Amino acid sequence: MRIVSFIICAAITVALIIVLNIQIPTGESKTPCLGAFLSPQNGFWQNAEAANTDFNADLKLAGLQGKAEVYFDERLVPHVYADNDHDAYFIQGYLHAKFRLWQMEFQTHAAAGRLSEILGAKSGSSDFLAIDKMFRRLGMVYGAEQSLKAMESNPVSKATADAYTAGVNSYINALPANKYPLEYKLLNYKPEPWNNLKTQLFLKYMSFDLAGGDWDFEMTNAKNIFSAADIEMLYPMVADSLDPIVPKGTAFPQAGVTVSKPSSADSLYYNVLDSIQAPFINRPDRDNGSNNWAVAGTKTKSGAPILCNDPHLGLNLPAIWYEMQISTPNFNAYGVTFPGSPSIIIGFNDSCAWGVTNASRDVKDYFEIEFRDTTMQEYKFNGQWQKSTFRKEVIKVKDGSEVVENIAMTVFGPVMYDRHYANKFKDNKSYAVRWQAHESTDEGSTFYKLNRAKNFNDFIGAISTFGCPGQNFLFASKRGTVAIRQQGRFVAKWRRQGDFVMPGIDSSYMWKAYIPIDENPTSVNPERGFVSSANQRPVDATYPYYMNGDFDLYRGMIINRKLNNMSAITPTDMQRLQTDNYNVFAETARPLLLKNIDDTRLTGEERDYLTKLRTWNLRNDINEEGPTIFAAWIDSLETAVWSDEFSQTQLPLRWPDEGTLVEALLRDSAFKFVDNIQTPAIETLPEICLQSFKLAYKQLKKLEGEQRLKWGKYKDTGVRHLLRLPALSKLHLPIGGGRHIINATKSTHGPGWRMIVHLTDKIEAYGIIPGGQSGNAGSKYYDDFIDTWAQGKYYTLLFLTHDEAKNNQQTKWKMTFSKA
């Protein structure tokens, strides 16, 4: 009997050992190895952080050159005071790793096409292997390698990156397994050493996230259906109501670079009818952008400029941004940083402030490549067979297998799509991608120099080498200057170049020249007393270069209107403006809709919704029902107008922007696309408005039954963990705003950093991020700013001298750093 009991106990023990050391499938995913994950000594319990955690420390680290002190304020924002620049960047890397290690490594794994390595090939509806292939074939690693060469050829940039990387690795090397961030334990892997390539990968990921106008395949398909005249109506280059970054009427100099379309363009480009099955493209949110503006002292109550910036990106946890101050004998800057990269990215120093918004320009084009045979060893170029080179990209998958992508390289760039790619075109053609992010540029040096800028000339010098992604760099100084320049390496293009896939058979369609930097759209101390941008087209039609991209029309319009009408401006006024929920798009469209609907043909319940829309105050506040009704009707109207023409093909097409439809109907109520080509009758705008409202009513009735008619419930904003784990996210936030609103908060996207800098003698600044300083979900500092952010409130930013930090009541902890 004892033997039987022993055998049973031994079997149970063996089973437990096995079960606790494997990942068990649970639906569409797997558990972590439960033994390690549940271990009291090494498991997730170790990530719980007491509310009264003491962050004081005396650290002696190899790699430091002198001494430094870091004071943490009550929000866990570090204020770094170092004897030299090397140690400042070393400590920045150390702190990024201490508070955001998993985030910074996970994002660079994504950029490098390495998600399958830690998440497996697939999980539920997420195809990580497809994402990895897409990033490898897009040339993310290739582009990062080119930028690494540029960065390491600059001694200052290399020293900065080396110091930062050394700081990250100093923390990683001393990190015991039981203190690994929670996500490593959940996914059953461990951190690896940091290097300068990872920093470049992160910057390339931002280039991808902020790419504008990547619709080449969809636009090419449109040529099958629409005439050239239709293309101009559906995808106009300049909107009627555009209020550009550079004020209308500004005289631009004659173009310093002249380009002309190839002689074969009419036959090989504009008029070729191609049928393209669009490949897998993991597109970033098209509303990735920002607002920024700076008002001159002539418009402020104090007489000092005020600069404001709120970049719009995905609402994620850990937060995209990490707030900090860095001070050395050479500079003193405060703002937000990217975990994974040195320097303050958006912020201010003792003399000036700066901010950025996305230029939204198209800097990525595709070329059809004709290979000699299926080996892809040679391709036709300029009448000859050109030799291909190849990049071997090995994708490691979590189950131990490897997937190899042999990517042909051409004079245009990597061949992103070919017959070997799983998401190939129906015709098996090959397409190379030319992307500005493939160029050898050193974007990090821009922020290094901005941190030290003293005046406008320093500002221009700092941004002049910034290549990709194109940005609207905003500037204001204590001396009174306010300025904005759209900066990037922008290709000088002939009309519609790059809107469609281009032939790759010769050099005639290649990028020929760049727009000279001093001809990039710029405004300095304009007469109106402010500069601003909100991802709109930066210039009117008189600008001498062709410009394509994904531009927002309405945020820039309402920002400029409000700033024009303001005077004696204070920082409080700017806080109200950054969080304003007024819907200027609805202001434009609602009269058109109401004018063209016959409410006598509505039922009583339908009329009730129409009345709510008619009496709506045009604000997208959380408890308003008007914005939900308006959004449902506009969406239904767009479907009614476009779907008949666009359903002529099963191939993907780019639908026109909302503003394009509204402006077309305001110009001409008999707009040709109003008629439904699938019926014998000729539909009119009033008929389409009635039909679309009745369809919207069905959706609205359903929403009301679900108690989701109020805008806040309908939009349902949340800040999601990068792994989309609800338990580690902050969901169902009561916040207004939306697309085309200054407060551009959507469901999972919005202002990731709100900043206001009043450039008085003693700088007065305010800011907030939708997250917290810590990346540890077990810390009170993980998401402690979110509720305040949702309420539209701000924190005062403590811009302290070293002596002030020592005695400030809001500094709670001190870390000292010295060389070992």
Image (spheres, helix red, strand yellow):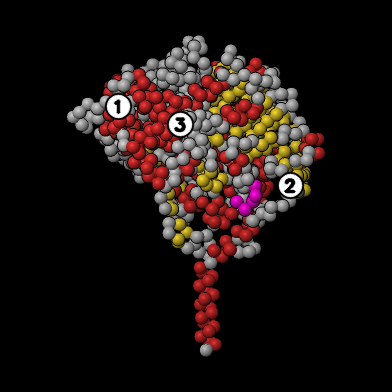
Query: Across the whole image, how many numbered discs are drawn on residues?
Result: 3
Q: Nearer the viewer, residue 343 or 286?
A: 286
> Residue 354 appears in which quarter of the rendering?
top right
Instruction: Name the residue: 35% across, 39% down.
Output: 605
Q: Is residue 172 magenta?
A: no
**Separation of marks 3 and 2 at Cα, in angstroms:** 61 Å
Q: Amino acid at mark 1?
A: Pro
Instruction: Name the residue: 57% across, 40% down.
Output: 790
Label 1 sits on residue: 686
Instruction: Name the residue: 40% across, 50% down.
Output: 125
**Separation of marks 1 and 3 at Cα, in angstroms:** 21 Å
Q: Amino acid at mark 3?
A: Trp
Q: Is residue 780 magenta?
A: yes
Crowding around mark 3 (Cα neighbors within 10 Å: few <14, some 14 to 19, many 20+) is some
Q: Earlier in the sequence, mark 3 or mark 2?
A: 2
Q: Identify the disc placed on residue 61.
A: 2
Decide: marks 3, 2 in contact (CB < 8 A)?
no
Q: Amino acid at mark 2?
A: Leu
599 w.r.t. 255: above or below: below
**Separation of marks 1 and 2 at Cα, in angstroms:** 74 Å
Q: Nearer the viewer, residue 88 or 215?
A: 215
Q: Which residues are magenta?
A: 777-781
Decide: marks 1, 3 in contact (CB < 8 A)?
no
Crowding around mark 1 (Cα neighbors within 10 Å: few <14, some 14 to 19, many 20+) is some
Label 3 sits on residue: 616
Q: Secondary structure at mark 1?
A: helix
Residue reaching furthest to the bottom: 1
For residue 496, say whether it is visible.
no
Percent coordinates x, y for residue 699 in the rendering: 36, 41
